Amino acid sequence: MIARTSMKIAPLLFSVVLLVACGPARDTEQAPARTRNVILFVGDGFGGAQTMLGIQYARLVEKRELNIELLMRDGNTGYSQPLPFERIVIDSAAAATQLATGQAVRNETLGLNPDGYPIETILEWAHERGLGTGLVTNMRITHATPAAFTVHQGSRYDSEQVLMDDLLQDGDVDVFLGGGARALVPAGSRVSEALPGIPEELDGESIRNDELNWVEELAGKGYVIVSDSSSLHEAASHATKLLGMFSAGHFPYVIDGRQRNLSTVPSLAEMTSAAIDILSRHNEGFFILVEGGRIDSAGHANDAGTMLHEILDFDDAVGKGLEFQRSHPDTLVLVTGDHDTGGFSFTDANFGPAAKVQLDSGIVYQPDIPYPSKDQLEILFRQNASYSYILKQAGMDPEKLVELVLAHTGLEMTMAEARDALVRNEQGPYYGGSDDSASALLGRALSRHTYVVWSTGEHTSDPVPTYGRGPGAEKLRGIYLNTHIYSVMRETLETGP
Ligand SMILES: [Zn+2]
């Protein structure tokens, strides 16, 4: 593990040194007096190998470059070390708190220093200074990453009601876009009663134990309320404050939403555009956090096809940030992950002899083992339902599982493998729950087609690629603790480039 990590870092450090020596000075030459806006994109569970998965797919299959690759090629690229207080593997709550506050903190805490006292976040600081603020996610809005920017609690696993009340009570967020509506509506009611745009499949009961109706409260404070994609577009043209809630809990995975025709749920890119439109009407500038949260869920489930689609969705959102940055160069756009999830990789496994090819020179080329290629990327992309959806549909019926896997991935598995995935749950502490374990066993069975390997269903200690464009982005070159990202954002907003 140590060797693997340092091998990854060495070429990067080398290229960073080169870029510092001969990189363009464009950013500093064109930079305006004060940086007005910061858009921070956090891919949850978006480590180096996940980044490469997106880049390799776009290059080899679609013959294009992702926004993240274009950004990395600017050269304002580095590695952040996801190191929490006194531990070597981080969770999303601590990681996001570190990005939000610049301090190393305890795992699973939100917005508290290691002694348990609240620390001001960049979002709260920006709000104090009169900047507009926004939280955008495809998870429930009270989930670790968005919550860490404005919630101060000892545990991310406190009730959703406690987290939601903490999130909303100070009124320091102007735009909320995401899921988790079940903590907004009074006890005993259904989410769709207050938010009629939410379809039945994404509806749910309130999880509150009181009569508080946050939807009404926020409407009374001037927030425009929307719950489907078309009203979101409409609101983006005139609202100054917005609550957009599109699901009782997390959003469905991109491929599951598509498959089930859940067209009321906006993409991450649509929500990012709406947040930018609204907040760019603030005179003092803005701070927005955009989280691609379901990359992490797919990583926990060891489901690479689903993860690829989440990464592409996240990249589209980054594209919206860059589009705005082009016409507003006083904007810093940053992209990072909070940590790697799953230890994902492709591997050159020994699945039998590779094909023989006659080269132009006459040499007969036949490598010892087959290596994964474009074919594997195409296989992953072809998947049109998540493993979690497939497993739910199959119930405990192995025959049905074999059929569904073929229908949704185009791949064959044996009855024995299907039975194994459904009954075996022996991956113990490396997997959080039996769902993730079944999903991992399914992925393991299909790995002879996908060449995908995973090391865990949890997080790893890998460093995370970090890059950006705009005033201050050159400070992202190198390798640093993830708390440095906070300093880059704060310094550029405070003092300009
Ligand atoms: Zn996670």
Image (cartoon, rainbow, N blue to C red):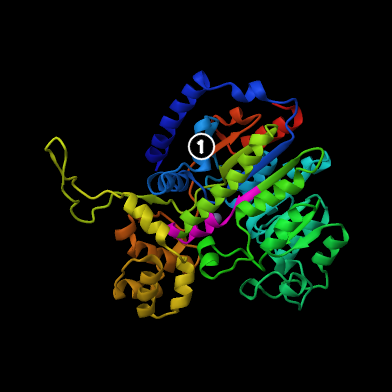
Residue 475 or residue 378, whichever sits in front: 378
Question: Residue type at mark 1?
Answer: Leu
Residue 29 or residue 178, whichever sits in front: 29
Does the stretch in magenta take in 381? no
Q: Residue at x 72, y 42 (%)?
A: 287
Report the label total.
1
The residue that label 1 is drawn on is 70
Decide if residue 439 is on the left or right side of residue 97. left
Q: Residue at x 59, y 39 (%)?
A: 482
Q: Residue at x 66, y 54 (%)?
A: 271
Q: Does the residue tagged 1 have its C-beta within 8 Å of any atom of ligand 1?
A: no
Residue 479 or residue 76, whichever sits in front: 76
Q: Report if residue 163 is visible in the image.
A: no
Quadrant of the rendered image holding ligand 1: bottom right
- The extreme right residue here reads 220
Q: Report if residue 81 is visible in the image.
A: yes
Name above or below for residue 387 compared with residue 114. below
Q: Which range of residues does the magenta coloring cover?
A: 290-305
Instruction: Estimate how packed mark 1 is, as few (under 14), some (14 to 19) or many (20 or more) residues with alpha carbons within 10 Å.
Output: few
Q: Quadrant of residue 419?
A: bottom left
Q: Position of residue 248 (x, y in %)?
A: 67, 68
Name above or below for residue 352 compared with residue 86. below
Does the stretch in magenta take in 301? yes
Q: Name the element at disc 1.
A: helix
Q: Position of residue 392 (x, y in %)?
A: 48, 75
Name above or below for residue 125 compared with residue 176. above
Q: Position of residue 143 (x, y in %)?
A: 65, 58
Q: Quadrant of the C terminus?
A: top right
Q: Position of residue 451 (x, y in %)?
A: 32, 54
Decide if residue 244 is on the left or right side of residue 104. right
Q: Quadrant of the N terminus?
A: top left
